[in-house]
Image (spheres, helix red, strand yellow):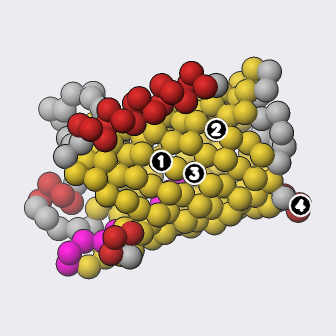
Amino acid sequence: MKKGFLILLCVFGTLFASAQTYSFQVWTGVEASIDLSKRLSLDVGVESRFQQHSALLKQASAEVEARYSLTKPLFVGASYEFADKYRIQGYFPVHTFAALVGYKKKFGNFRVAIQTKMNVSKNTYIKNEKSLLPSFVDKNKLKVAYVANKRVRPSLFVETYHPLGAGTNYSIATVKYGANCSFGFRKQIGLDLGYMLRHEIQDDELISIVTLSIEKSF
């Protein structure tokens, strides 16, 4: 474990040293999870994102996601997100539809989850003619969680963003490095605290993000 944290510190230190710009955000949210059957589940969540140096609401969103377990470790799903994003001219909605497939497996006290998610987004902010066309992004995520304790579950994850489109190469545009800890309480209520470092590679920008969400299972 100590060796793993030292590697993460080295990665973060290299990123901070190389990035040209740096900003800080706070994301808060509320999530609810409902098991409709043994195989089918539904997740609903709302989220707000604030730019801390100006206390500016960067984005407010609501998302609903359905997942179906094909086997115990393998699942597929679909989601829809409505996000109101801030621009200098005001707030403009973005509609995002996604299809996902994932695999999760328990190894002793650890759980490893891999997920790929294809996103199709429709922007309403008019910058030019191309800005109104649908955009496609493939997101890949690897997460490792320590699940020996039901009430306290730390985890680490890495997520990459790959824009897709005519004339574009399958390259990484954004990388997220994150560490979370979930605290379970009675009546299936949980509190999730986390820190995430988002690296926008093309803009050479680092965004430091603190996340806080309340979760409820039914």
Q: SS for tag 2? A: strand
Q: Residue furthest right?
A: 186
Q: Position of residue 135 (x, y in %)?
A: 28, 48
- What's the CA distance linking mark 2 and mark 1? 12 Å
Q: Which residues are magenta?
A: 79-89
Tell me if 178 is positioned left or right of 160 in this view.
Answer: right
**Disc 4 residue type (three-letter):** Arg
| In this picture, residue 108 sits left or right of residue 83 | right
Q: Earlier in the sequence, mark 4 or mark 1?
A: 4
**Residue identifier under label 2:** 155
- Main SS, magenta region, reads strand
Residue at 33% over, 75% down: 54
Q: Quadrant of residue 190?
A: bottom right
Residue identifier under label 1: 196
Which amino acid, by three-letter code, is at mark 2?
Ser
Residue in view at x 63 percent, y 31 percent: 144
Residue 44 seen in render: no
Task: Find the distance from the CA under tag 2 to the CA under tag 3.
Answer: 9 Å
Mark 4 — residue? 186
Q: Are marks 1 and 3 in contact (CB under 8 Å)?
A: yes
**Rendering quarter of residue 123:** bottom left
